Each structure stands twice: as C-alpha cells, then as structure tokens.
Image: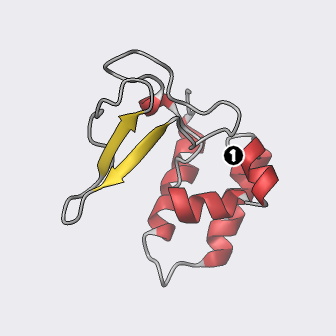
Amino acid sequence: MTINKETELKLQKLREESRKFPNSDKQIMQNLVDELFEEGTYYITPDMQESGKTPMYMVNHYGVYWFNWDNIADCEWCGKDIRDIEKGPPNTKSIYVKRLGVDGGQLICFDCESEMKKRS
C-alpha cells in the first residue's frame, strides 16, 4: 500500500498524539481519524462491521497503521498468505505470541507452524 506524504503526516500526528496516553487529546485524534476515514485510508472491515468496532477503536487497540497489511502478507517459511481476507486487517491466519519481558512478539503460521520474524 502506497501512502502519500499528506496522509503520512496525518498518521504521524495521530501516532504522536496517541503516544501521549492517558493525556492524549481525544478531539485531535478523532478529527485525524475522521479525515483518514473520509479520504479512504481508514475504512470499515467486515470484522469491524460485525463487531461494531470503529476506526478510532482500531487505532486505540491496534495502532495507527492497523489498516496496513504490507509487512505481514506471506509466511516467510511456507509462502502462504497469512492475511485473513474475510475479516480484514489487522486479522491474520496466525497466532501472535507475546513473551514476558520481551518487546514485540512472534507470529506463528497456522499452515506450517513456523515462527516468523519478530513483530513489534
């Protein structure tokens, strides 16, 4: 997915504001999310529609780049597409394993059960 400079600036502003949690300005965040939604960067996935999640919910729980699957398309070992196309981003056909005391975690492919590169 190619992101233009204007959109990237909005995403960066949103990330900066969200990192101020719990002192984030919710109105600034909502305005940026609304702009990103109106321009089509953010959208409603089938899973979001089914579960009543909003783009703001996705930002708060999955991060500013929740919509971008570019870094997790294929298992690096078996080559299968691990994206859950039916549910939409950020859902995958893999297991995310978080280890205590370690930043990030591991994705484990459902097909070959291999651990993929560390994800943060």
Residue at the (69%, 49%) spot, across then down = 36
- Residue 27 position (above or below residue 74): below
| Residue pointed to by mark 1 | 42
Q: Position of residue 6 (x, y in %)?
A: 59, 42
Position in image of residue 45 (x %, y %):
74, 43
Q: Is residue 105 left or right of residue 41?
A: left
Q: Nearer the viewer, residue 99 or 60?
A: 99
Decide which of 42, 31 is in the foreground and name it: 42
Viewer-proximal residue, 24 or 117? 117
Q: Amino acid at mark 1?
A: Tyr
> For residue 76, which quarter of the picture?
top left
Residue sitting at the far top: 79
On the rendered image, what quadrant is the N terminus found in? top right
Residue 72 found in image quarter: top left
User: Which residue, as the protein is rendered here, is positioned at the far left?
Assistant: 101
- Labels in figure, total: 1
The residue under the point 43% across, 69% down is 19
Q: Residue at the location (54% across, 51% down)?
A: 11
Q: Position of residue 86 (x, y in %)?
A: 71, 33
Q: Dot 1 lies on which element?
A: loop
